Image: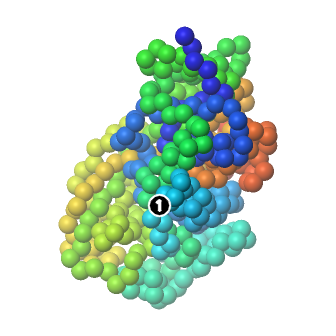
Amino acid sequence: MPKQSDIIIVGGGVIGSSIAYHLLHDGYEGEITIFEKDQVYEYASTPRSAGGIRQLFTTSINIQISRYGLKKYKAFPEEMAVGSEKAIIDFKQHGYLFLAKDENVEQLQKQLALQQENGVPSELLSKEELLSIIPELEINDLQGGLYCHEDGYLDPYSVMQGYVRKTKELGGTYIYEEVETILQEKGRVTGVKLKSGDVYHAPIVINCAGPWAAELSERLGLPIPVVPLKRQIIQFDVSEPLQRDLPLTVDPTGIYFRHEGKSIITGYSEKVKPGIDFKWKRSFFEEELWPVLAARIPNFERAKVKRGWAGIYSHNTKDQNAIIGEHPDLPGYYMACGFSGHGMQQAPAIGKGLSELIRTNSYETLDLRPLHFERFANNELVIEGAVV
C-alpha cells in the first residue's frame, strides 16, 4: 500500500537535513520524510568535502549566504545540541586567503569592494604582509592576497550528523532506501517510487540528491544544467612543521591547502570528464600538486602522503551556483542542488530559505530569488568568479 507524507526530501546529506531541520524548527507541523540511499554516508559528498567556510565570493548573493552561514556555524554547537550533548563541529577560524599575482590583483580589488559593501572584514594584503599570516610563504612572484580572518574550516561530517540528529529529535523520519523516480500526475508532484517498488505519496518533493540530482530530474523530463565532477583531496605530512596554523589558502594556480590537525590537506579542480568516480591517485599529488606546493612553501618539499579520497562536485555548468526553489513547470517539485562545491558552507542559509519559501511562499531572512531555475531561460545568470 502507498505510504503518505507531507514533504519528501530526496537526499539526507547536509543540504537535505538542513532543510528538514529548519522546517521543523520553524514550526512546520506536517510529516517530513527524508530518503537517503547511503545509510553510512560512505559516498555522500558532505563528509568528502574540504570543509571550507568563506565569505570571499564575487557575487552579493553568495556573500550574504556565507555571512549567514558563518553566524550559524559559530552558534552551531549550542543551537544544535541534543539534550546536554553539544554538536561539536571543530570550526577553526584560521581565515581564508587567496594569493594574487599581477594578472588577478585588479579582480581581487573589485571583490574586496563588494565584500566590504556587504559587511565582510576582508583585507587586501601586500606580499610582505602575507608573511605575517604564513611566515614560510614564497612571495617573490606574488603581488599580495585577499584575506578574511573570520573564515576558516570545520568538520563536514559532524555538521551533517548534527543536522540529522536534531531533525530526528524534532520528528523528522529518515528512511535509508534509494528513490528511483519522482512521481507526477495531472501536472504536479505526487510522491516518489523507491527502487524496492514501494511508493510514498506527498504533495511536495525536494530534490537534494547532490551528484545524482540531475539524473533524478532527467527522469521527470525536467533536465537541469548540473553534472557530477570528481574532486580529489590528498592528506600529507611534512618533516618540518609550520610556525602557524594555515588559513585555507588558494594559490594562483587554483591549488588549495590547509591544516588538518598536524597534517595538511590539498586539492585542485582538475579537468575531468563528468561522471561518478571515487578513485584517487597518488600520482595526482606527485605530478600536479606537489611541485606547486613545494615551490610555494619550502616545508612542503619533504612530504609524505598519508591518505587520499575523492568526492563529487554537483557542478552547475551555466554559472557554478546553486539552483534553489520550485520548478516553474511542475508545482510541488523543489530543488536544492548544483552547489558546485559550496553546499557545505551554504547549507544553513539554504535550509532557512526553503523553510520560509515552503511555509510562507516567500523568502524572509535572505532573498534567494536570484538562484531560481528560471534564470537560465531568462538570461539572468549569477556568475561566480571565485570557484575553488
Whole-percent x and y of residue 123? 59, 79
Whole-percent x and y of residue 185? 67, 14
Relative horizontal placement of residue 349, taking residue 236 as reference (left or right): right
Q: Please, which residue is most extreme toward the front here?
A: 84
Task: Say above or below: 358 vs 74.
Answer: above
Examine the rendering and report whether any part of residue 1 can be seen: yes
Relative horizontal placement of residue 277, taking residue 72 as reference (left or right): left
Give the residue at x 54% y 25%. 218
User: Where, by quadrant of the figure, is residue 355 drawn?
Assistant: top right
- The quadrant in which the N terminus is found is top right
Q: Please, which residue is most extreme toward the top here?
A: 1
Whole-percent x and y of residue 264? 32, 68
Give the residue at x 48% y 30%. 175
Closer to the camera in the image, 368 or 388? 368
Whole-percent x and y of residue 2? 57, 14
Amino acid type shown at disc 1: Ile
Q: Residues within 10 Å of mark 1 (few under 14, many from 20)?
A: many
Q: Secondary structure at mark 1?
A: loop
Closer to the camera in the image, 174 or 341? 174
Task: Say above or below: 271 vs 131.
Answer: above
Task: Say above or below: 333 vs 60.
Answer: above
Count how many numbered circles sit on residues in the image: 1
Task: Say above or below: 151 vs 128.
Answer: above
User: Badge 1 is on which residue?
Assistant: 89
